[in-house]
Amino acid sequence: MAEIGEVEETIEGRNVGIMWDLEQKLDQPMDEEAHKLKNMYKEKGLSTLMLLRLAFQSLGIVYGDLGTSPLYVFYNTFPDGINDTEDVVGELSLIIYSLLLIPLIKYVFIVCKANDNGQGGTLAIYSLLCRNGKLKLIPDQQRSDQDLTTYDRTFFPEGSLAEKTMSWLEKKDSRKRALLVIVLVGTCMTVGDGIFTPAISVLSATGGIKVNNPKMSSDTVVIVAVLILVGLFSMQQYGTDKVSWLFAPIVFIWLLFIGGTGLYNICKYDTSVLKAFSPTYVYMYFKRRGRDGWVSLGGILLSITGTEALYDDIAYFPLLAIQLAFTFFVFPCLLLAYCGQAAYLVQNKDNYANAFYESIPDSVYWPMFIVATGAAVVGSQATISGTYSIIKQAVAHGCFPQVKVVHTSKKFLGQIYSPDINWILMVGCIAVTARFKDQNQIGNAYGTAVAVVMLVTTVLMVLLMLLVWRCHWILIFIFTVLSLVVEGAYFSAVLLKVNQGGWLPLVIAAVLLVVMLVWNYVKIKRYEFQVHSKVSMSWIIGLGPSLGLVRVPGIGIVYSELASGVPHIFSHVITNLPAVHSVVVFVCVKYLPVYTVPEEERFLVKRIGSKTFRMFRCVARYGYKDLHKKDDDFENKLFNNLFSFIQIERMMEPVSNSSSSASICSQTHQSREVLTNNNDMEMFSSMVDYTVSTLDTIMPLDITNDTASLCHDRAVDDEEETNELEFLKNGRDSGVVHIQGNTVVKASRGSSLPKKIAINYVYAFLKKMCRGNNLIFNVPHESLLNVGQVFYV
């Protein structure tokens, strides 16, 4: 008996060990996989050679706009002529310190670090703020969203200034709405840049023709500029992938040309302009010119235009590469170019109207003209591409109607094209160029847009430094004061030129802001309507597996904005139709305040009710940079994740008999292998015979009987799982119907006149012009079922 007891303990110990090993193999922690996924989005270490190569490539995408500013700065600063050559030195001093403080120190080394995993712009900062607090006006946040590998956030120490500030912002919707309005103002002005940058860059570049042909009329220059703009926007549909390799060499040659020409002019005309590096000439400039000097800041502001585009385009390259390119190449070349033009104007102050082309040596005039036109096109292209990206972000944040966005490159995911936005920008650029015909008025409009974008960025940066970076209040104070003093001065100067073209960006921004606010307002009200009118889950469960209807073969996919609960359109369907599909899947397409959601984390699937209900919920999550590509098959991905869920659900039931049976069946099989390999068959046979004849309650026999029973249960469950998968596949073969709500939103009878106009006309027009989910997800028209409902706001 002692020997048998020892054998039983040995076998039991082996069984426990085998079960433990099997459990560890089947259910290993996911920490390592999650760590690998998260590291996929971190910036990898780069070799010095690769870093220099990327710094060179960044010239074409990031610095094209900023690099073309020397074409028009001096003329816009002195539109009425130069009275005193000392004014040229004072203006040059202002340009030098503007380039030093705004693009170099503020943007390249501070603001560009405030990126959302490489994504820049005002909406990217807004996404960072929303992730760290409940600042979204649509309360659709879920705890599972924070488990994404791209959903990084910080936690505030209790009682800290950051925690108090965030709590203050979260308490009232009016504060959240005010923050959103500030963000959208910056966004609208950035979109305005997409109109003014091509207009002023191309017009300034083509204006050089008149220098070599003085008799040519201004109308001819405008026609040439318009033709270039039409060609530029017409080529957008083909993408920049095939010609983007030319961008960096063009801008590189352009910067070398203007830097070399500037150095030549300094040596040839007047080296004393280098005294402008002393800040005392800034003070002397304002003292001498007074109010006129203050107004001229609007022209000097154009020397830093393109800085805001720099921040929007940082997604294409590592931050260190952008910093190296600007600090050691772009910045010195721009300084030489402006110093050279100033040296020329000191000796030739009557040639202020075309200072750039007049200062070029005759021997390099035509090569410079060709390169200048190419650089203007490249700078415009970067701004246009950035506008597409900004509109895409606005759509994801629920602040702009759905527009068509397509990929133009199979290699680079970020290269996109929106035909609707493209033609709007083209019409705007042509209208601005043909209407004003003058760099000065376009420059005033451009400067207004840039000044507003910079002020908005400063306000958002202050919140970011406090709530996300948690910087010391002294650093925040210094950053705020310096930024507001410099940018506030520029903004006050451009306001004085509102009647000279500065009104145009304000009008464009006002129209865009109305569109965005109306769309966002109605979207919030629609979401609240769906939340309040959703059907109780207990009511659905109370109907029983058949839902009180005939369950016909097929699968019904019900689209909704709700991530929980049953949408009202489903109750509308089952109360008006006598039948419903045998399988029902509720799908919620949700945009998160992250730049992307990895494909393997995109879908969340769960079951509604028991298995007999055949009802599921799926949440499809997207980031603001994710696109629904034309070749994506949303339906296939949805069903693949649904099938995977059923299989994983079966494996992840630790408390059920099925899970136990799986472990025990495997344990029994492996224990027999161990006994066989150890040549213990005779002892095993004797032990079994002995327990059958004398001790029928001993554990080995009981385990064998229980194992047989559980293995039988496991087989039954496997058969049920196979049957359910087969049932779903058969249902899919029978037909899939996509059910969407076609909600008509109207203003209530007691609404004010502005509200009626905004909802009944503005929103109705936008809704009619935007794309529906059936087009976004490539739903076949014959498989679409629209359920109409009217909602009064």
Image: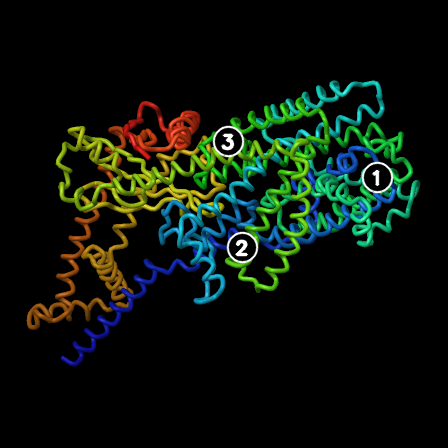
Q: Which residue is mark 3?
A: 406
Disc 2 and disc 3 in contact, CB within 8 angstroms: no
In the image, farthest residue toward the bottom = 2
Q: Quadrant of residue 73?
A: top right
Tell me what residue is drawn at x 24 percent, y 33 percent: 731
Note whether 96 is above or below 230 in the view shown: below
User: Can residue 51 be seen by looking at this rendering?
Assistant: no
Real-space Cα distance between discs 3 and 1? Answer: 43 Å
Decide if residue 557 is on the left or right side of residue 249: left
- The amino acid on which the numbered mark 3 sits, given as a three-letter code, is Val
Q: Considering depth in this image, is 406 or 307 the residue closer to the camera?
A: 307
- Expressed as whole percent of the image width and height from the top left, the position of residue 15 reads 24, 67
Q: Quadrant of the C terminus?
A: top left
Note whether 115 is above or below 497 in the view shown: below
Note whether 228 is above or below 355 in the view shown: above
Answer with mark 3 or mark 1, whichever residue precedes in sequence.
1
Disc 1 and disc 2 in contact, CB within 8 angstroms: no
Tell me what residue is drawn at x 50 percent, y 40 percent: 393
Q: Nearer the viewer, mark 3 or mark 1?
A: 1
Q: Considering depth in this image, is 669 or 376 the residue closer to the camera?
A: 376
Q: Quadrant of the N terminus?
A: bottom left
Residue 464 numbered tag = 2
Q: Quadrant of residue 534?
A: top left
Local packing at callout 1 (Cα closer than 10 Å; few below 14, some 14-19, many 20+) is many
Tell me what residue is drawn at x 14 percent, y 33 percent: 549
Residue 341 numbered tag = 1
Residue 252 numbered tag = none
Note whether 206 is above or below 386 in the view shown: above
- The amino acid on which the numbered mark 2 sits, given as a three-letter code, is Leu
What SS does tag 2 mark?
A: helix
